[in-house]
């Protein structure tokens, strides 16, 4: 479920980016669907693995030709528009400049995106999060909508036991993440400049060790599971808390793991030139969410998402550069048994895992998605149950939970 922006991209291509006060002659101009929310939803849907429950977009467009065209484009890529509403504001527009090296500058006029409100989010999520369809519910949010609405979406996801992910881009001027943000984020995905901004630092001169230290600082502020820093051509860095089943430690720093991630080694497009980096971060976020919804462990999902984003930068545009399922190489596909399980869902049972601890749910899903459990003939659904602190033997506690 993606809660966020839907924009019309207006992209000009030129040899270099203009300096302040400079006028350049462009070499090409295209209009295309965009918006961080729309991009991420299309990426998640295009992979073709979120089939039973689907990919849903929660957002707003204007009552204009651009809005109608954008909704049609989303549905054509497999995104449900059931919870996209139409308003009398203009549809969001992004003016983008791209130079020959693939770098870009973007100015967004948000329009209808800023009209999305908490009531609409509540209405959508209360219905969509009732059943994960045997998959992990994931709510993915960005900041091209009002921060208050974005926070409300994260809080609703937490309340309903979904995995909450925030891509803090673009950070509004003067906005700061407070405790109520951190406590409702399972996974935070900033890029290098956003990481520095969140930590009140300048991006200039920050080393890899500095990036790791800043990511750890965000975990210490309350991010519940992981901070994933996207690093462009360097891949990504995962800084996460240790999970149940991993060796514990007494030193707080020992309980945090850092892993550098790159695209799969056998990704075929690695040697092709970079054409356009617009939308690459959104491709990563959408792909990561899709893979996590299928129970893929975080490190593998992150590597596959890096591969998906890497494929996207070899073509122009954002959504139109995102590869479809049929175009994905083997290293970005889930194994055949998972693909077949979607086709045979009617013959599979569903077991509901009742827990108030999302980390336990993620670990069980990871175990069930491993190679040694391919033959398990059921899907894992989830429901959240808040229980009081229970005392007694494990048998007594289990009995009380069952009775509850």
Image (cartoon, grey):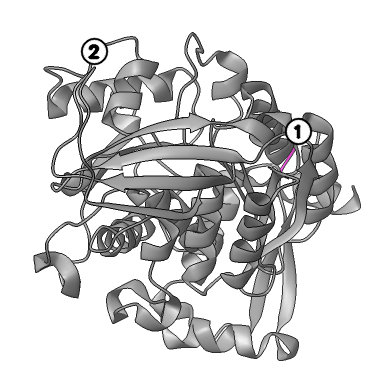
Q: Is residue 211 above or below residue 16?
A: above
Point out residue 74 in the picture as x, y percentages from the top left corner: 60, 62
Q: Is residue 30 above or below residue 386?
A: below
Relative placement, left or right, of 334 versus 347 is left
Quadrant assignment, res 228? top left
In this orientation, which residue lies closer to the viewer: 363 or 208?
A: 208
* Camera sees residue 166: no
* Camera sees residue 290: yes
Q: Residue at x 54, y 23 (%)?
A: 182
Point out residue 1 in the picture as x, y percentages from the top left corner: 64, 52
Quadrant assignment, res 265? bottom left
Point out residue 368 in the picture as x, y percentages from the top left corner: 52, 70
Q: Is residue 374 above or below residue 370?
A: below
Q: CA distance from mark 2 to mark 1?
A: 49 Å
Q: Is residue 10 above or below residue 310?
A: above
Question: Magenta stretch containing residue 133, yes or no?
Answer: no
In this orientation, which residue lies closer to the viewer: 340 or 43?
A: 43
Q: Residue at x 31, y 45 (%)?
A: 12
Q: Which residue is mark 2?
A: 202
Q: Which residue is mark 1?
A: 391
Q: Which residues are magenta?
A: 389-393
Relative placement, left or right, of 349 versus 107 is right
Q: Residue at x 72, y 59 (%)?
A: 81
Quadrant assignment, res 267? bottom left
Callout in the foreground (2, 1): 2
Point out residue 69 in the picture as x, y percentages from the top left corner: 63, 59
In terms of sequence position, does the residue under pointer 2 or pointer 1 come before the other? 2
Relative placement, left or right, of 29 versus 363 is left
């Amino acid at each position: 479920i993606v809660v966020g922006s839907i924009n019309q991209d207006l992209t000009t291509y030129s040899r270099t980016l203009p300096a302040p006060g400079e006028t350049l002659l462009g070499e090409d101009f295209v209009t295309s669907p965009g918006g961080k929310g729309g991009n991420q939803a299309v990426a998640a849907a295009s992979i073709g693995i979120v089939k039973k429950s689907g990919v849903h977009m929660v957002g707003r467009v204007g009552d204009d030709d651009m809005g109608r065209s954008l909704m049609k484009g989303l549905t054509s890529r497999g995104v449900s528009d059931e919870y996209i509403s139409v308003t009398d504001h203009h549809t969001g527009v992004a003016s983008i400049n791209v130079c020959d090296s693939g770098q870009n500058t973007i100015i967004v006029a948000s329009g209808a995106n800023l009209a999305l409100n908490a009531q609409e989010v509540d209405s959508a999520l209360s219905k969509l999060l009732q059943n994960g369809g045997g998959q992990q519910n994931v709510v993915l949010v960005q900041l091209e909508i009002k921060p208050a609405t974005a926070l409300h979406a994260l809080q609703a996801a937490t309340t309903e036991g979904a995995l909450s992910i925030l891509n803090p881009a673009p950070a509004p001027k003067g906005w700061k993440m407070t405790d109520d943000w951190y406590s409702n984020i399972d996974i935070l995905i900033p890029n290098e400049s956003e990481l520095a901004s969140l930590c009140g630092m300048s991006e200039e001169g920050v080393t890899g060790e500095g990036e790791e230290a800043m990511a750890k600082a965000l975990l210490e502020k309350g991010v519940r599971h992981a901070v994933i820093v996207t690093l462009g051509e360097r891949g990504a860095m995962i800084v996460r808390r240790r999970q149940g089943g991993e060796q514990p430690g007494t030193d707080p720093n020992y309980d945090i793991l850092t892993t550098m991630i790159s695209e799969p080694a056998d990704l075929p497009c690695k040697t092709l030139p970079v054409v356009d980096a617009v939308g690459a971060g959104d491709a990563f976020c959408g792909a990561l969410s899709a893979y996590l919804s299928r129970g893929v462990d975080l490190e593998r999902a992150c590597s596959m998402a890096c591969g998906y984003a890497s494929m996207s930068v070899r073509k122009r545009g954002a959504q139109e550069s995102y590869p479809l399922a049929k175009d994905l190489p083997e290293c970005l596909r889930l194994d055949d048994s998972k693909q077949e399980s979607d086709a045979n869902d009617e013959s599979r049972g569903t077991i509901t895992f009742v827990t108030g601890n999302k980390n336990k749910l993620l670990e069980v899903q990871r175990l069930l998605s491993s190679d040694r459990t391919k033959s398990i003939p059921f899907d894992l659904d989830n429901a959240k149950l808040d229980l009081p602190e229970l005392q007694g033997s494990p048998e007594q506690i289990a009995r009380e939970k069952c009775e509850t």
